[in-house]
Amino acid sequence: MLKIEELVHAYIHTHCDFEKELVLTNYFQADWEADILIVDAEGISHEIEIKLSKSDFKNDFKKSYINKDTGEKFLKHDKISCGDYVCNAFSFLLPMGMVDSSLIPEHCGIIEFYHNEDTWNTEFYLIRPPKRLHEDSYWKLNDKDLFIRKIALNLLQRKMEIKGKQEELIFKNPFDLKKRK
């Protein structure tokens, strides 16, 4: 069976231009994690949410969040559809025929895939392009410097996590060092 990491790899390596686009996977933004986040040179952003089962798809519409500033509770897709969302576009990436397109809100793009387990080829089909939710640049809505620092920290954490799986790492507690000074 195709793993989500293999699906992400297949999609971004066939549909993304790494010289012109910033492509992140499993990036926490807004109030949830984006499976794939693509930001082009003009700052136009597109979140792609991967759903591999009908139950996971249905649960996406039950997700609610509380605005940390106002305390207001809202559903994820209500926030996306009204344009109060950091990305310019939102799409679902789904197995071919898993969900009838009439069940997917009009603001969402639909990308279906077919994975041939015999040849290990994965083909992607754009069923419906996403609607533009707003015209603001991703960089107008996000601090670019903070974004770069977060990416650098994330890269360092992943490097240490991978290295830690290969060998035992022992780090000094930085809080003990501050007490001694």
Image: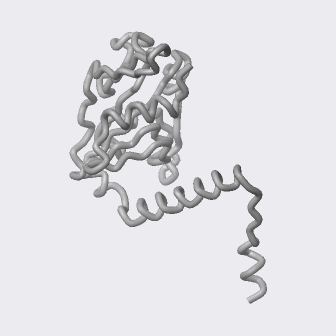
Vertical arrangement, residue 21 with respect to residue 155, above or below: above
The C terminus lies in which quarter of the figure? bottom right
Residue depicted at x 55% and y 27%:
3
Vertical arrangement, residue 47 with respect to residue 139, above or below: above
User: Residue 56 in the image: x percent, y percent?
Assistant: 54, 22
Residue depicted at x 58% and y 53%:
158
Which sits in the foreground, 2 or 71? Answer: 2
In this rendering, would 34 be left or right of 173? Answer: left
Furthest toward the front, the residue is 119
In this rendering, would 136 be left or right of 171? Answer: left
Vertical arrangement, residue 100 with respect to residue 166, above or below: above
Which colour assignment does the render follow?
one colour
In this rendering, would 164 be left or right of 134? Answer: right
Which sits in the foreground, 179 or 25? Answer: 25
Residue depicted at x 37% and y 46%:
23
User: Residue 121 in the image: x percent, y percent?
Assistant: 41, 21
User: Residue 97 in the image: x percent, y percent?
Assistant: 40, 10
How many tags in the picture? 0
Residue depicted at x 40% and y 22%:
122
User: Residue 58 in the image: x percent, y percent?
Assistant: 51, 19
The N terminus lies in which quarter of the figure? top right
